[in-house]
Image: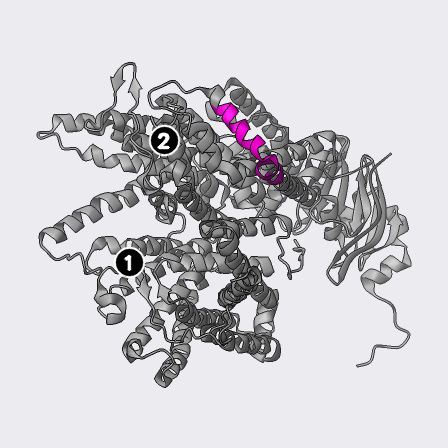
Amino acid sequence: MNILEISDLTVRFGGLTAVNAVSLDIPAKEIVSVIGPNGAGKTTLFNAITGIYDPTSGAIRFNGQEARRPFRWTTALALALIGFVSGLSLVLIANVEPLWDTSITSNYVYEQAFLWSKAFSAASGYFSESPGQHFAVPFLIGGLIGLAGAFAIWQRTRRAPEVAARAGIARTFQNIRLFNQMTALDNVLLGMDSQLRTRVWHAALRLPLYWRERDESARQAMDILRFVDLDREANQLAENLSYGHQRRLEIARALAMQPRLLLLDEPAAGMNPAETQELMKLIHDIRERGITVLLIEHHMQVVMGISDRIAVLDHGEKIAAGTPPEVRNNPRVVEAYLGKTYEDPPPT
Amino acid sequence: MSGSEIFLQQLIIGLSNGMIIALIALGYTMVYGIIELINFAHGDLFMLGSFAALTVVGVLGLDHLAAGAPGMWLGLFLMLLIVPVFCGGLNWLADRFAYRHLRDSTKLAPLVSAIGLSFVFMNIGLLWGGVPMNVFSLGRSAASPKDFPALVSNANLLGQSAVEFTTKDLMVFVVTLPLMVLLTWFVKGTRSGKAMRAVAQDRLAARLMGIPVDRVIGQTFLIGGALAGVASVVSSVYNNTIYFQMGYRAGMDAFTAAVLGGIGSLPGAVLGGLVIGLARAMCDQYLETRWTNVLVFTVLILVLVFRPQGLLGSRAKEKV
Amino acid sequence: MAARPRILFHWSFLIVAALIPLIELLLPGHPHVGDLLRPIFIMAMLGLGLNILTGFTGQLNLGVAAFMAVGAYSYAILTCDIYPFRLGFWSATALTVLVGLTVGLFLGLPTIRLRGDYLAIVTLGFGEIVEDVLKNLDSITKGTQGINPLPSPSWFGYHFRAETYQPWYYLFLAFLAVLVLLNRNLQRSRVGRAWISIREDELASSCMGVNPMKMKLLAFALGAAQCSLAGALWASYLGSSGEPGNYDFQVSIIALCIVIVGGMGNIGGVLLGALVIMGFNSIVLETVTNFLKAHQIISSSNVFTSPGSWKYMMYGLALILMMRFRPEGLLPSRQFKAEAHPDQPHSPPTS
């Protein structure tokens, strides 16, 4: 069963085609590496999967569905509601002075009880006077603008990173993007954010749910830190951690999302051999927890050592895919990394 | 006046004012294009230019001349020389002392600095109104609006027609149109212009190519400021009144124009300026003057919701 | 986040403020210094409203005065005799907060997605629009006259009066304390954490499942509600809605100065900022002006010698200089200080 299906994906930036008609299937619970020379489009591929870029064409299906906000009946309802409210608002705005006059000011006699029914009938009278001009026109204009505007905004935010994240795709970044001024623990807690149920009023009023969840989430966060062996650094500011620890913290933060698919962007960059070994073990442990891992890596030892499958990109195109031995011996792959052999020596 | 005559008249007024707004919008859009900063102080720079223009009038004694006298044209020419230099220089100083060191800091810092500068400029305008010169009512009631003498006559160039296209309107177009052509040539045809476009596209790459980025940015501020200076002279002569809080209105109109046309796009700024000028004129005539500012704000919101890249801008995807 | 052992500024501020009227009673002559502190409380509330959006989430709102105006006028319409609603203090205030929340939502929904500088200009424009609208709808808002008189609040039979300031003082202080508590609770919770992550790195935050638009909109609306509350309290004390010109750009900038000078993202910083800025505005400037007037240095026709005409410049310079030399503010939140000086090492909080 494929957890991720990339079909004919193309991502273009103006004149630059970063990813060109790439198709790739990632089976669940496997460790798949994406390799290729620099500029091959690997990070762009990751960004498209996680919703940062919109595909120019092609599709990405996660668990059979595209990771974008679906148009459900609740969406239609919300849009209609916004349209209705903006229509009413425009009616009120366009008529506020005369409406206020007829319904409130004319009916209000100081010190006497105010008859709301009279005000209401005066208001309806005002509208029935010329329903077209007073009510229908502004309501339609306002409603249309509201509806169209809400739809335009909704459409523009359909494919957003948080949609992919909540669907179950987590990631780390090529250049570490931790929340530097937060502690390691807070970074992990932030990763758990989408699963927390504390809302504004729970937090503001310190209701019991706030306290329960605070302790529970802190416990879970410490568990995750323990899993990546960073529990002793829990209260350190993220920026004060060593480079290797920062990389592991990013992974811990991603794991806090309880993802089904984890994307690691060059996790072994800058690591010494000992750290690399630990990383490979960590990735195995992650797979043991049932999480599919997709990684971009240049470190061949890691790639060959842990991958079930490898895909090779060059200049935005997939040039090879298969098991590590298959890929290692593929002449196109060798050529992409090492270049062609010349019959004659290159001209001086 | 008949209905179509009223419409034509508003068209002329709208286009004239629109050209002024366009000039200010050009300054906004040039600075935004190059360092992605909305120069909040730009509108107030325009206001200071007006005060500088009035000072030139006072110093040269132009307020004693009859409109249309030959000395007046010389005076106008001098204003168009002095005030843009003043405004351009002031804008350059603003970049040098308020923005430059904040280039790589948090996103908020240059914005806050620009707001602060806007307030400083506004206060300078207030104090300027208290200068003991005749043109400033001898410094009494510094805060109230000042009259700008009628240097260019209101004579209708269309003779007896009900629709008026006056010498003032002509002046607006005579000054602004060649200037825009000059600007386009500068940006497209000269090395400096090319350097500006390069810095606007990719600052690091431009630096790596040996372009003196800070100097180019300073130049952009200079030119943008000079444009605001020209606009302030034209606007003062056209509208015959200045006040120290006019920077806010001018800035809002110009910003809306720049966004409408597509921020970062020079032709967009001109198009936006004309549209806003026309919209204001039409709203003043056919709706009510008191709602014109609300209309401009509504236009801004609508553009930002439905087409944030503006009419002539392109949707650039940011590479992460 | 670990709690720090030392007493935090915002609590000390509130405690000291609570004691001032009592101390005054003990001093001979009963000086009414406390009277001057009330505008500080109101502006502090405004600052807190701005701080939620600007300090926590890093977005600039240049139109907080507009929300204050909305609050003041809503309260006035709901309580004044000339209109049929005639609600009491508590119901009017509660409704006003709701109105502020709604207006914040209305403005925020289409605009919160915009880049920081665009949002700043939009809120700036909104500030002017509200002022314009209030002026234009003068049959309802009574234009420059304002809606008045408003009845003073009464609690359990006790009527607040304009002459005795102490009950007003404690009422405002109580509201301020509640706001401080609520803001602090939000800051140290999942909500505050999400906000701060958005300010630090919005993209990474959204990749972790946080919905930046929703959180920013929340901050915007909550800030608007707080500013409206400040407006309502101000109107109730004034006994009038005030006139539209009272809620102009200058007020928004003062609020911005309070947050910037005091310390962005730090509640104690906002209180300090309010003390410094309003103290300067109301107390120092007043004293200097009176001094100069007494010695006849000021003449009303000379704008250069009256301290009031240098106000804009001082606020403007305060902002520019703060950004140049101490962008984190006088009392920085630990996090923002580190953001502002990325190349200096920082120590973690004591656990």
Q: Is B122 on the left-hand or right-hand side of B11?
A: left
Which of the chains bears the disc numbered 2?
A: C
The residue under the point 28% across, 65% down is B128
Which residue is the site of mark 1?
Answer: B143
Q: Position of residue B154 (x, y in %)?
A: 42, 73
Residues at marks 1 and 2 touching, judged by CB atoms closer than 8 Å: no
Which residue is the site of mark 2?
Answer: C76
Q: Quadrant of the C terminus of chain A?
A: bottom right
Q: Is residue A192 located in the magenta-colored stretch of the structure?
A: no
Few, some or many residues within 10 Å of mark 2 (<14, 14–19, 20+): many
Q: Is residue A137 located in the magenta-colored stretch of the structure?
A: yes
Q: Type of residue at label 1?
A: Ala
Magenta stretch bounds: A119-138
> Relative to B295, does residue C34 appear above or below in the rendering?
above
Q: CA distance from mark 1 to mark 2?
A: 30 Å
Q: Position of residue C189 (x, y in %)?
A: 50, 30
Q: Which mark is residue A326?
A: none
Which of the chains bears the disc numbered 1?
A: B
Is any part of residue B255 visible from this angle?
Answer: no
Q: Type of residue at label 2?
A: Ala
Magenta region, main secondary structure: helix
Helix, strand or loop at label 2? It is helix
Helix, strand or loop at label 1? It is loop
